[in-house]
Image (cartoon, grey):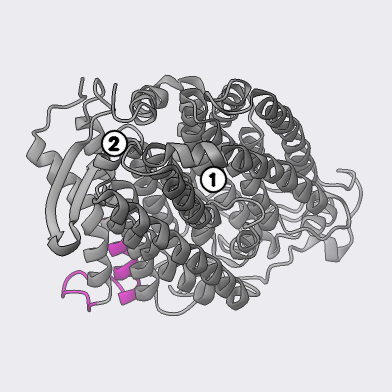
Amino acid sequence: MTVIDISPSVMQFLLAFIVVAPLLGALAALLPAPPGLKGRNPDQAVLRHGVTVTGAVLVAAIVLAAGFDHDHPATMQATTDISWIPALDVRIHLGIDGISLPLLVLTALLTFLCALYSYFKLPAGPSPKAFVALVLVLESGTLATFAVLDLLLFFLAFEMVLIPMYFLIARWGGDQRQAAAWKFILYTLLGSVVMLLGLLLIGLKSGTFDMVALATDNGRGLTTSVQVIAVLAIGLGLAVKTPMWPLHSWLPDAHTAAPTVGSVLLAGVLLKMGTYGFVRILLPVAPDGMRTFAPYLAAFAVVGIVYGSLACLALARTGAKGDLKRLIAYSSVGHMGFVLLGIATMTPTGVNGALFANIAHGLITGLLFFLVGAVKDRYGTADLDTLAGATGAALYGRAPRLGALLAFAAVASLGLPGLAGFWGEMLTLFGAYSPAEGLSRPAFRTFMAIGAFGTLLTAAYMLIVVRRVCMGEHAPHSRLSPDEQSPQAPRAADGPQPSGTAGSQPSGTVSSQPSGAAGSASSETAGPRTATTPQLADIHPYEAAAWTPLVALTVLAGLWPAVLLGLTDPAVQQLLAGGKS
């Protein structure tokens, strides 16, 4: 069944366009704008170019999803197979199935929303041309990672995203951005070197780099010792990108220093590349090696779940001077622990839960980083003590719609039933209750119990964040000092600002400030200031446009999980069965 009937040749073109168009768009962004397309200034033109290219890729991804045969999601569709390096039998092999299609659409959606958000609020830094080009290169590499079916092409696409993310952090980031960028690049590059050795080992020992052929063979052409070495090498590289405890320490620094859109793409898309590699490569290609390491992978996963939650609780406590962006980053360590636990079970239930949790994390954590960025823009800080202790009625009293949306994202992140975060965690725990044959059931049930305890810790720190940031710690009717009445961010001029500065809007755009509001979208109070609840600018139209799709999809996936599970389950069943339905 397809939503619309599309010929195979058009499907091939759409997938190739989705992968290549952002790369071509990045090159075009660096060129001078043609006459008539410059807009009111060059900065506005290049930002509009970024929105146009990412929008075209999103439309193509939606059409591709509509033309996808949902009756056969385990079959590779929209395939292209062209010889590239005959001496090594490396081929330009593209295709999608029920596992990769949701990640492809998620990547296209988040990148478009980030481009739209940046059009109105470009982070402070160098040339907007370089910013747009880097975002488009990042999108191309990520989409290619989910679309290629050759091991060496997978590695090239996997590495392609490192350089643009490094520069987004190092040039457009906040405090300590240089150190965070170096830490990010060194960790991921070292992991990638080891991963390349494992990929070469599989390709040379099996005689092919084709991922479909290797999955169909299901490890029968590889000895157990080769599989164990390959899983160890490839798994280390993937674990760094995921990130798995204790290889996670680059993540909090990178998220804290990155600009808002950098954090959204890093959490919503890049982390998924590591877990996708576990499912696409290691589970079907080296099942014996995975079975050897599965208990250790599960153990590291549940330690990450508890560790991430405890770190968040430590940051959330009063007086800890915890950074809200850093707290959300540590929460990602815990959430990705559930994904790794589901993969380690090697069962359809657990792997489906991992894939569902992947998508849910991309939606919810992407929304959280958007919201935290907006809070930081308004207050001039993401320090939890400042947000909670010096703001009177806090977000509920000063920007009620923003506060309500932050509370929604927080309860979605803690796994509230009826929202997307619930299903992934529940299915991974069910998978751990009854792991695959050959795995210790008592050990995995212990891991399940620890993971379930981690859900309670997640609820604890998320509710503390909501209470402190949204409700504040001062009594609502207490009189504030003049210092407490003023937000920490510097006063900005009304109306649009020149592009290329923090909190800027492209020239010619209409300010979204409400009538009578003072200040800009980034940091200023709105309306008359009182002694009890000085107001902030609430959600602006461009913010609502960027955040509404994530809210809607979080609710849709929570209420109708069969939409996603109907795609992933047949593909996972076939993958674990070695290419046999």
Q: Nearer the viewer, residue 329 or 345?
A: 345
Q: Nearer the viewer, residue 461 or 491?
A: 461
Residue 41 magenta: yes
Q: Residue at x 77, y 55 (%)?
A: 384
SS state under label 1? helix
Mark 1 highlights which residue? 367
Q: Residue at x 33, y 30 (%)?
A: 578
Q: Kindly report the distance in space between the C-alpha atoms of the residues bearing marks 2 and 1.
A: 40 Å
Q: Nearer the viewer, residue 510 or 377?
A: 377
Q: Nearer the viewer, residue 270 or 150?
A: 150
Look at the picture and state if 503 lies above or below 126.
Answer: above
The amino acid pointed to by label 2 is Asp
Look at the picture and state if 208 lies above or below 22.
Answer: above
Look at the picture and state if 494 lies above or below 334.
Answer: below
Q: Quadrant of residue 517?
A: bottom right
Q: Position of residue 291 (x, y in %)?
A: 52, 36
Question: For the residue carrying disc 1, how many other residues have a C-alpha within 10 Å: few (<14), some (14-19), or many (20+)?
Answer: many
The answer, for residue 548, to whether it is visible in the render is no
The answer, for residue 252, to whether it is visible in the render is yes
Question: For the residue carrying disc 2, how many other residues have a C-alpha within 10 Å: few (<14), some (14-19), or many (20+)?
Answer: some
Mark 2 highlights which residue? 217
The amino acid pointed to by label 1 is Leu
Q: Position of residue 246 (x, y in %)?
A: 67, 55
Image quadrant containing the N terminus: top left
| Residue 129 appears left or right of 176 | left
Image quadrant containing the C terminus: top left
The first of marks 2 and 1 along the sequence is: 2
* Magenta-highlighted residues: 31-52
Residue 334's disc is: none
Q: Residue at x 34, y 23 (%)?
A: 570
SS state under label 2? helix
Residue 173 magenta: no
